[in-house]
């Protein structure tokens, strides 16, 4: 398989059973997903899924610690305090932070989150169709180099396998804060396999 993980292990993970850290890391790289998107959040009801603010873990985009040193594994680079996120951004350690909203339906095809953008991000590619809604500040989202200027209340959608980049608008309120929703397609696995190179260590 693309991930180098056995079919039996994949089937075990799909059933919600445990696997080793090595296998989990390999699966994240193969599917171009964050761990928050692979591990389901327990729901208080069989009829809906919700996520409260204190359940959101904020991941650092550039994977650097408080001294600016690179952090190898994104799973251990969380900054949940809003003031600390702003401090690190002002020091130049981080370009943006992502807080995944852990509310998904069982068997669903959607993930969502909030992104705080302080500086221009690296160019990215990942699975799905991405919908973006600007909550505050102003953002420029470039898709294959074409810019889309978003102000509060504006939205856009694009194929996330295209090269895209997030940036705040100079002089606007910082951070630019956006809500994003990523939905998969029926042929997502073959699209990702044909488009993305194998990623041993998946990050932003």
Image (cartoon, rainbow, N blue to C red):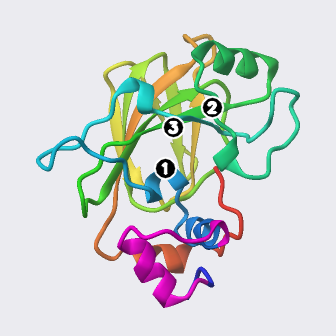
Of labels 1 and 2, the one closer to you:
1
Q: The residue tagged with tag 2: helix, strand or loop?
A: strand
- Residue 29: image location, x then y, percent: 61, 67
Q: Which mark is residue 96?
A: 2
**In the picture provided, is 71 more to the left or to the right than 23?**
right
Calculate the distance from the C-alpha at mark 3 to the C-alpha at mark 2: 13 Å
At 49% across and 62% down in the image, what residue appears? 161
| Residue 169 lies in quadrant | top right
Which sits in the foreground, 190 or 103? 103
Magenta stretch encompasses residue 145:
no
- Residue 88: image location, x then y, percent: 74, 21
At 68% across and 17% down in the image, what residue appears? 84
Mark sitting earlier along the chain (1/2): 1
Q: The residue tagged with tag 1: helix, strand or loop?
A: helix
Calculate the distance from the C-alpha at mark 1 to the C-alpha at mark 2: 17 Å
Highlighted range, magenta: 5-22
Q: State yes or no: discs 3 and 2 in contact (Cβ < 8 Å).
A: no
Which sits in the foreground, 95 or 200? 200
At 49% across and 20% down in the image, what residue appears? 138
Which sits in the foreground, 51 or 184? 51
125 over 5 or under it: above or below: above
Residue under numbered circle 3? 141
Residue under numbered circle 1? 36
Calculate the distance from the C-alpha at mark 1 to the C-alpha at mark 3: 23 Å
């Amino acid at each position: 398989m693309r991930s180098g993980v056995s079919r039996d292990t994949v089937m075990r993970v799909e059933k919600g059973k445990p696997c080793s850290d090595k296998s989990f890391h390999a699966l994240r790289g193969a599917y171009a997903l964050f761990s928050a998107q692979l591990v389901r959040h327990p729901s208080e009801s069989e009829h809906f899924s919700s996520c409260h603010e204190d359940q959101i873990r904020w991941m650092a985009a550039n994977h650097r610690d408080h001294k600016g040193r690179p952090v190898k594994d994104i799973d251990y680079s969380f900054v949940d305090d809003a003031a600390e996120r702003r401090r690190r951004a002002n020091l130049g350690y981080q370009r943006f932070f992502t807080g995944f909203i852990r509310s998904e339906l069982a068997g669903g095809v959607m993930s969502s989150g909030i992104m705080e953008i302080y500086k221009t991000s690296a160019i990215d590619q990942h699975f799905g169709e991405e919908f973006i809604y600007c909550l505050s500040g102003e953002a420029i989202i470039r898709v294959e180099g074409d810019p889309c200027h978003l102000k509060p209340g504006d939205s856009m959608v694009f194929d996330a396998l295209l090269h895209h980049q997030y940036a705040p608008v100079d002089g606007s309120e910082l951070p630019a804060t956006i809500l994003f929703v990523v939905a998969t397609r029926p042929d997502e696995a073959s699209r990702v396999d044909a488009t993305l190179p194998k990623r041993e260590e998946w990050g932003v």
